Amino acid sequence: MNDSTQSGPAEKRNFRRILPSLSRLQIPDPKKEMLFSELLSLLGAGLDFSASFRLLIEGEKDRRHKALLQRLYADVVAGSSLWRAMEMCGRFSPLDRGVVRIGEETGRLTESLEFLTDYYAKRTEQHRMVRSAVSYPLIVLGVAVVVVIFMLVVVVPMFEQVYARMGGELPTLTRWIIGASKQMPLFFGVAAAVLLGGAAGYLLLREQESFRRAQAALLMYTPLVGNIIRKNNQAHFCKLLYLLTASGVPLLTGIEMLREIITFYPYRQSFGQIADGLRRGRLLSASLEEYPMLYDRKLVILLRVGEETNRLPQMLRKQSDELTRELEYRLRQLGSMLEPLLILFVGLLVAIVLISMYLPMFKLGGAIN
């Protein structure tokens, strides 16, 4: 500990030089999983926090991540709590900071680290499930879009010249496709402007409450996606509230802490109303019942049973496990539905272009006969 204290000024100078790269550093989920898992293993082996963190720093090979760990360690040695150091570096999510804060303030840091390790392991697995389910259809869709664009830009004008020399009235679908071919440069310009404008608008408005409310409403009412978001946030709610109540944190305090951890707009707003209800002496389940779009009826009933039998923490843990299993099932279901839908869309797109180009030939053949 003394060695690290004596080297503090030199470390601070190094941090100032490397801060620009740290500000661009995004910690991927597998890296977070490894970080929390290794710290959990070292602390579980009986090492103190200082020795554990020094070992983490020595074992890190990536220069930027190593500098990040050194910065965290220096802040903790200087007297800051770990969650506060994570907040100051700006590279950890509110969930990371909130869970570590729960662990530090309740004396159950190992359980908090275990939660984060399990969370990022499952999240990484869920991302792999989604990628494996949609990667092939997206590749097919991308190739098909390129082919269709090539047909509209190159092939359709050639057919148009042939049909112009032949004379006669073209079918409506063919005229529509030829018109779309002529508008392709305009379409590309409009698409680029919309994408750039949408990205700029998102960056400017993403912190405004009205925009976050509208974005959350759009996501919640999107088929399949809305259900996945609900299951994910409900699982986080149950798991984190279990961690708090099992640590002896009062229920009202736990709900107020969740506002800083679960940041999805509808749930964060609901926590304020739930906390007000708890202050007035209402049951947690009665407050949750006022938000049927956010909390499933089954969850409300089981939490009411837990409150009436004084087994709320156990019921929260059971529900968090069940909701996590349901979430994984929904993700697999999403992947199994996306693949045939995208392939069907690709087939229809190509078929429309080809049919529109060959329809005049069919009419010509009928006229000759």
Image (spheres, rainbow, N blue to C red):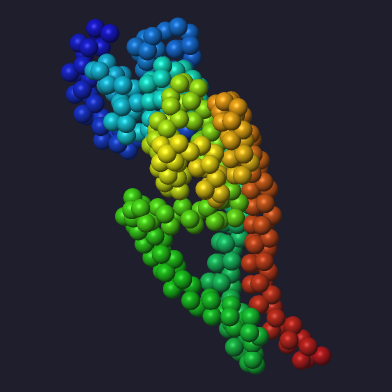
Res. 90 image quadrant: top left
Q: Which residue appears at 24% of the width and 26% of the height?
A: 15
Residue positioned 49% across, 14% down in the render:
41
Residue name at image x 45 percent, y 12 percent: 42
Residue 328 in percent (x, y) is at 63, 38
Residue 331 seen anywhere in this rendered image of the structure: no
**Which residue is nearer to you in this view: 277 or 369?**
277
222 to the left or right of 274: right
Q: Is residue 242 above or below residue 180?
A: above
**Image quadrant containing the N terminus:** top left
* Total numbered circles: 0
Q: Can residue 141 be seen in this snapshot?
A: yes
Q: Of residues 279 and 257, which is closer to you in this image? A: 279
| Front position in the image: 325 or 359 | 325
Q: Quadrant of the C terminus?
A: bottom right
* 38 to 157, vertically: above or below: above
Left or right of 221 on screen, residue 186: left
Q: Nearer the viewer, residue 158 or 8?
A: 8
